[in-house]
Image (cartoon, rainbow, N blue to C red):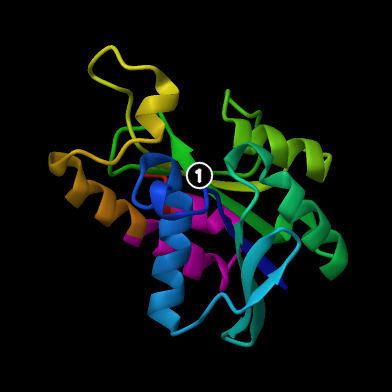
Amino acid sequence: MKCIVGLGNPGRRFEQTRHNVGFMVIDELLKRNNWKLSNKKFSGKYALETYNHEKVILLKPQTYMNLSGESLGPLKDFYQMDDSDIVVIYDDLDLPPGKIRLRQKGGHGGHNGIKSMIHHLGTKEFNRLRIGIGRPQTPIPVPDYVLGKFAKEEQQLVSESIEKAADACESWLDKPFQEVMNDYNQ
């Protein structure tokens, strides 16, 4: 069993904001495969499906970004998943819009959602898929920037990165994460 977790904030107010690109990738995977988030438990909404004979969970924590680990931790324990069977998708200020990067471990880099994941999983060693949102070009507080919507000129790049991230997730359901990293970190 594998688990794909998209980080974001629940509610209409946060739809299509930079901080919600993780949710956007989950939405793309749901659309592609005609799946639905039909389960509500573990402080999240999730789908339990099968992809090429592999059971897969797609999770959108409903705890708000900074507490995302409160959703994944209990779900992981309930389904007795290994950390290597989890990929967490989230926004990254240090990557430009349109870029994605995959990693197998690391620190939180100031990202509170990842800080919560590390705390609740008890490890820094879980797969991550970072989606670039870039840094603000004007003096704007980072919280306002990440909770803002993408500029018109960024939207095409962001759409492409969401599709690429969904492709990487589907690839991971068929082969080891290291191979997917080699394919997509170019």
Residue occupying image coordinates x 55% and y 49%: 7
Answer above or below: position of 182 versus 175. Answer: above
Residue occupying image coordinates x 83% and y 69%: 79
- Whether residue 124 appears in this view of the structure is no
Q: Is residue 165 magenta?
A: yes
Side of 78 where 131 appears, left or right: left
Residue 124: image location, x then y, percent: 73, 36
- Dot 1 amino acid type: Tyr
Question: In the rendered image, which quarter contains the C terminus?
Answer: top left
Side of 81 where 139 appears, left or right: left
Side of 2 where 149 appears, left or right: left
Residue 176: image location, x then y, percent: 61, 62
Question: In the rendered image, which quarter contains the N terminus?
Answer: bottom right
Q: Quadrant of residue 165?
A: bottom left
Residue receiving disc 1: 90
Q: What secondary structure is marked by label 1?
A: strand
Q: Residue furthest top?
A: 139
Q: Quadrant of residue 25?
A: bottom left
Comparing 35 with 184, the one in front is 35
From which residue to which does the magenta span run? Answer: 163-182
Residue occupying image coordinates x 50% and y 82%: 35
Query: Magenta span: helix, strand or loop, mainly?
Result: helix
Residue 57: image location, x then y, percent: 65, 71
